[in-house]
Image (tube, helix red, strand yellow):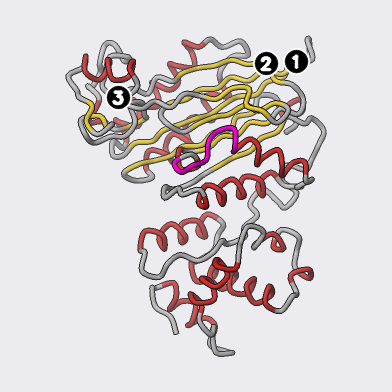
Amino acid sequence: MDVEKHGRMVFGVFDGHSNDKCSNYVAEHLRGKLHALPPLFTDAQLEKVCIEIDEQFLEDVGEGGTTATFCMVEYDPSTNKYSLVIANVGDSRTIVARDGKVAFATTDHKPSNAEEKARIERCGGSVRMNRVDGDLAVSRAFGDGPFKRVAANDLRNQKVIAVPDITRLALNIGDVIVIACDGVFEGNFVNEEVVSLVFSELDAKVLDLGVVSAKVCDMAVRRGSKDNISCMVVQLQPGVQHAATFGHKSFVPGPPYPKTHEASRTAYARMAALAGYSLADALQMRFDLLQSLSRNTMSQLPPIQQLAFSMSDEIDLESERIFFGQGPVPGNEKSFFESLANGGGH
């Protein structure tokens, strides 16, 4: 990240629930408003941006909700210092790490938290099964209109609010920011272990922070997470261009989903679509990678593809072989992978 050249830089993760309408909406509208803030903006101005976007979403769309954790990095040439402003709404999480250790982490907004619970109950709600009214698992979010009064005079006085916790920090060269949805931490994978993994990859001279992010996601699955998982890793290294060595939209499909698990198949298809591929295309790419591994020809592939099985063990590989079976008959590859994409196989 070279903030000296690009000015204010914005990074964030938006974890939607019910559907992806709110997460897409907030991600699309928030960035421009953040860049439009004055150089010395106040917490109140940032809070106002979040509230306005929330109100506009409820008016324009209304259906769905999303958590948000985002930050802005700025450079002051007069002092040669870097600063970070973090805003958190919900249970996605931003971690700042320094010298391999956690320097700061946001606090999740859960309904069972004492202050959050007090507000929910004060506004006529209840907390049951650690959920707002027994339904919503977060106490702060964009959207989620049924938990908000229309045009409330006090926007902090609702069962669910889009008011962020805001933190301002000084940044040092080499500091790392991990921005992730709650799926990363849902299993047995705590902040300190996430940071340890990130720095171990950096120490191993991994050249693409996208690869580091992917390894965090892989480890979260191995630690028991069953949720959707998104992670972004940012490092303050002015003048260093290694952050996206393999391109800003590099794509290596992961292990295929269980054939009988429709939600996993849908998620895999959406992942492929974000990179501009069909589900059948992604499956064929993964099968080709598996074949290269079996033939010991991985070293002939582009460097990023050589990392495709870096966290796989023999059980994982056997599961993939069972999924693909004998593979397609030569000349009939298209129909084979289309059949897999539709839930079938040969």
Q: Are marks 1 and 2 in contact (CB under 8 Å)?
A: yes
Quadrant housing the C terminus: bottom left
187 in relation to 103, above or below: below
Q: Disc 2 to disc 3, how far (Cα)? A: 30 Å
Question: Mark 3 falls on what kind of element?
Answer: loop
Q: Which residue is mark 2?
A: 170
User: What percent of the width, then of the height, locates residue 244?
Assistant: 72, 46
Dominant SS type (magenta): loop
Amino acid under disc 1: Lys
278 in relation to 162, above or below: below
Task: Using the image as rendered, state which of residue 169 and residue 77 is in the foreground.
Answer: 169
Crowding near the residue tagged with mark 1, few <14, some 14–19, many ≥20 C-alpha atoms within 10 Å = few
Q: Disc 1 to disc 3, how far (Cα)? A: 36 Å
Task: Using the image as rendered, state which of residue 219 and residue 283 is in the foreground.
Answer: 219
Mark carried by residue 160: 3
Residue furthest to the right in view is 239
Q: Is residue 24 magenta?
A: no
Judge from the rendering whether residue 27 lies leftward or rightward of residue 168; answer left or right.
left
User: What percent of the width, then of the height, locates residue 326?
Assistant: 53, 85
User: What's drawn in magenta, residue-wise?
Assistant: 186-193
Question: Which tag, 1 or 3, sits closer to the chain's start?
Answer: 1
Crowding near the residue tagged with mark 3, few <14, some 14–19, many ≥20 C-alpha atoms within 10 Å = many
Q: Is residue 192 magenta?
A: yes
Q: Which residue is mark 1?
A: 81
Judge from the rendering whether residue 227 lies leftward or rightward of residue 134; answer left or right.
right
Q: Are marks 2 and 3 in contact (CB under 8 Å)?
A: no
Question: Which tag, 1 or 2, sits closer to the chain's start?
Answer: 1
Amino acid under disc 3: Val
